[in-house]
Image: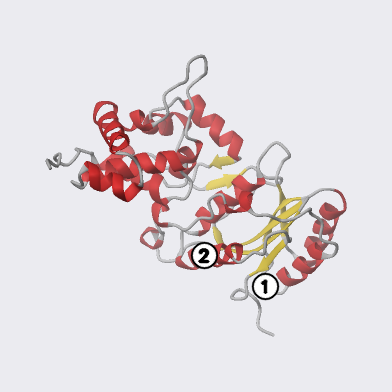
Amino acid sequence: MRIPPPLPVDARDAEILREWVESNLAGAAAVRRARIVLLAAAGRGTASIADELGCSKQTVITWRERYRAEGIAGLRDAPRSGRPSTVDAAAVIGRTLAPPPPRLGAPRWTTRLLGAELGISNVAVANVWRSWGVLPDAGGRVRLDTEPVLDGAVGAVVGLHLAPPVRVLALLWSEPAGGPEAVVPVPKRPGIGTRLAELDLGPGGDPGGLAAFLDRTEALSEPPALLADAAGADAALLADRAARSGAAVHAVPADLSWTRMVRVVCVLAGATAVGGDSVRALRAALAAHVPGAPFSWVTQTAAAQP
């Protein structure tokens, strides 16, 4: 059987496609198309790629040739009749969380710069940033559009409480030590993907659960920042306990997605080895969750010693 020659893929495209595959932010369809192209670039044959990815040979041929003809833009969904073309928001966010490559000579992403890099409009980039609550600043750091703005280097995720209608993520700040070379590239950082949205938390409600969760976070080695989606008495309890313990509460506006922000926080935390370990610990706790019950987890490794 004739095996086609390796598919020519330039280094910039390969970097973007690896981010789609490994960042935990790209959608399943985009990930499969990226893997097809990367495997074809490595010289794998059509049948071999189809077997590995569990798709048809024609699917492999279609996306390999679409990339050959149109580049990365060809891997995106074609516009449907009568409807505007879609933008892969996960790919935009994944790219935003990594600084611009040196070849661009820019310290931070702008909507026009990132739009040109991804082959979409600057308006599309701005819309994605707005819907995810992402605010790249002049120093190259990514802030989150909470109240007040969540602005700092995420060191680790240390707690998560889910008992509808209240949701709270606890995190610690930490500037990466060792210079830029110590920062883990975005494609290699752990994430939590869609795990939060898929959890079965039962009918909701957990009297006393939030107070117990906050008791445990107060035993951490330092006061955490709390990324909160809460209202009424729960919000009042968060504010009161934060004022007592020195924790900072960052409320997610009603028009933004708390779950999306948590996904971004976890990728940001994975910039260091310690932060990455904390995300993996959270993933393990989520995997062990008993369906039909609220979820409440606080790390043990960051707790103050008695």
- Give the quarter of the image for residue 118: top left
Which residue is labeled 2 in the image?
280
Label 2's element? Answer: helix
Residue 128 image-quadrant placement: top right
Residue 37 in sight in this render: yes
In which quadrant of the rendered image does the C terminus lie? bottom right
Where in the figure is residue 267, as x and y percent of width and height?
Answer: 50, 54
In this picture, is 194 found above or below 109?
Answer: below
**Labelled disc at residue 220:** 1
Q: Position of residue 246 (x, y in %)?
A: 74, 64
Relative vertical location of residue 82 with respect to residue 14 in this rendering, above or below: above
Task: Name the residue at the left extreme.
Answer: 2
Front residue of 27/144: it is 27
| Three-letter code, disc 1 | Leu
Mark 2 neighbour class, 10 Å CA radius: few under 14, some 14 to 19, many 20 or more: some
Relative to residue 191, is residue 4 drawn left or right? left
Q: Amino acid at mark 2?
A: Arg
Q: Is residue 10 above or below residue 155?
A: above
Asked whether, in this view, residue 100 is left or right of residue 275, the answer is: left
Q: Residues within 10 Å of mark 1 (few under 14, many from 20)?
A: many
**Position of the N terminus by quadrant:** top left
Q: Position of residue 113 (x, y in %)?
A: 41, 32
